[in-house]
Image (spheres, rainbow, N blue to C red):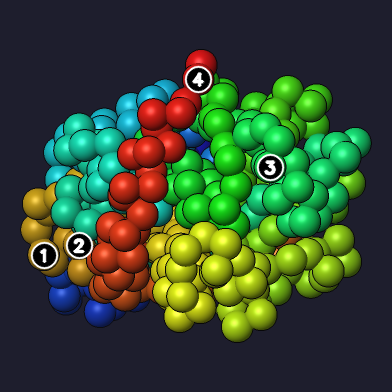
Amino acid sequence: MTFSRRHLLAAAAAGFSGCASRQTKSGCEALVGQSIRWIVPYPPGGSYDNFSRLFEAPFERALGAEIIIGNEPGGGALVGATKLRDARPDGRTLGILNAPGLLAASISAGSSFPSPASDFSIVGRLGRARALLVTGASSPLRSVEDLIARSRTKPLVFALTGAGSNNLVAIAGITSLLGLQATYLAGYGGSREETLAVMRGEVDLVSTSYETLQTSVAAGDVRPILQVSAQAISTLPAMQSVARLAGPDGWAVRRAAATGRTVAQAAEDAQALDDAFGAGIVVAAPKGMPAELLACLRSKFDAAVADPMFLQAAKAADRPLDTSNGVEGLKAIEAAEAHLSRFVPLVREAIARIRK
């Protein structure tokens, strides 16, 4: 006799749940042995794609279902996020989202961008986004002081995927808090293309998450200039002496007078920018699914992120985890939305300076 993968997953789920599952409805029974479409709104090979493929096997085991990952890039994640938002809320379409990026887009670029705070059911958070500013390894820019000096003579050129990216929020916040002149070169297909652009010297700088850049930083292909956080975001040797934006000794406070802020205002704005990215990498479902089904998906998510095989795989892949359940994940998104609102004028001003 031969058995399909779907049958094996269904049998595994039955074995894991034991007798209790035959007596109590879990809300996920309709998913056992079925195929679940998993939307990644970015190209293959990026951090969100990698996270999805690490999480695929443990979530399959928890659900007893087959997950089929599909990349739906385009529009700065708008294409994939919209398809996830508009899917039927029956548990058969799930996906991974960049919560800060979508929040930034929906706040600054208009309601056409789905908002993770109101347009999705949050199943859980896999990790946090930690913003990092880098330049190319051969760039003459080596420090924050160099950025300030260069900016006095001509605008610094930053790479962007588009107007609806969290990278634009990070850059708008950083340049405002440091008092830098900036212009933006948009149209790159994703973080990989942005990174290649700064490596080739097409642009001066790029800001994206450390999780996306860590391989390039470790290989010495890019030079980290500034981390948005108040604390070190990595134990990697190349990150140990990197300047910080937030914190009592951070560059935002040091540049407060130059940017027309009080020390307290500068510290508060820098911390808000760091906190805004805490919403991070979330697993989401379409809005409107039955409460019992959502509760079950959240429970299975919690089981999957605690799976020793998943934890081992994430460690081996050097993918830092900062997980939380769906309820806490939604609270973090709502808090990030409040933090991001103060940067809307800066983002709109930055959009006006984008050149393609």
Q: Earlier in the sequence, mark 2 or mark 4?
A: 2
Q: Is residue 269 placed above or below 89 in the rendered structure?
A: below
In this rendering, does residue 265 appear at all?
yes
Residue under numbered circle 2 = 294
Give the alpha-carbon distance from disc 4 to disc 3, as whole Å. 20 Å
Mark 4 vs mark 1: in front: 4
Question: Which amino acid type corresponds to the residue marked 1 in the rendered image?
Answer: Ala
Q: Earlier in the sequence, mark 1 or mark 3?
A: 3
Callout 1–callout 2 Cβ contact below 8 Å: yes
Q: Position of residue 163 (x, y in %)?
A: 40, 32
Marks 2 and 3 sit apart, C-alpha to C-alpha, by: 53 Å
Residue annotated with mark 1: 291
Residue 349 image point, x, y percent: 38, 38
Q: Are marks 2 and 4 in contact (CB under 8 Å)?
A: no
Tell me the element at label 2: helix
Find disc 3 in the rendering and name its residue.
152
- Callout 2: few (<14), some (14-19), or many (20+) C-alpha neighbours within 10 Å? many
As rendered, which of 305 and 73 lies closer to the eye? 73
Residue 44, image quadrant: top right
In front: label 4 or label 3: 3
CB under 8 Å between discs 1 and 3: no
Amino acid type, label 4? Arg
- Relative to 346, does residue 61 appear above or below in the rendering? below
Residue hosting label 4? 355
Q: Secondary structure at mark 1?
A: helix
The mark nearer the N terminus, 2 or 3, is 3
**In front here: 269 or 310?**
269
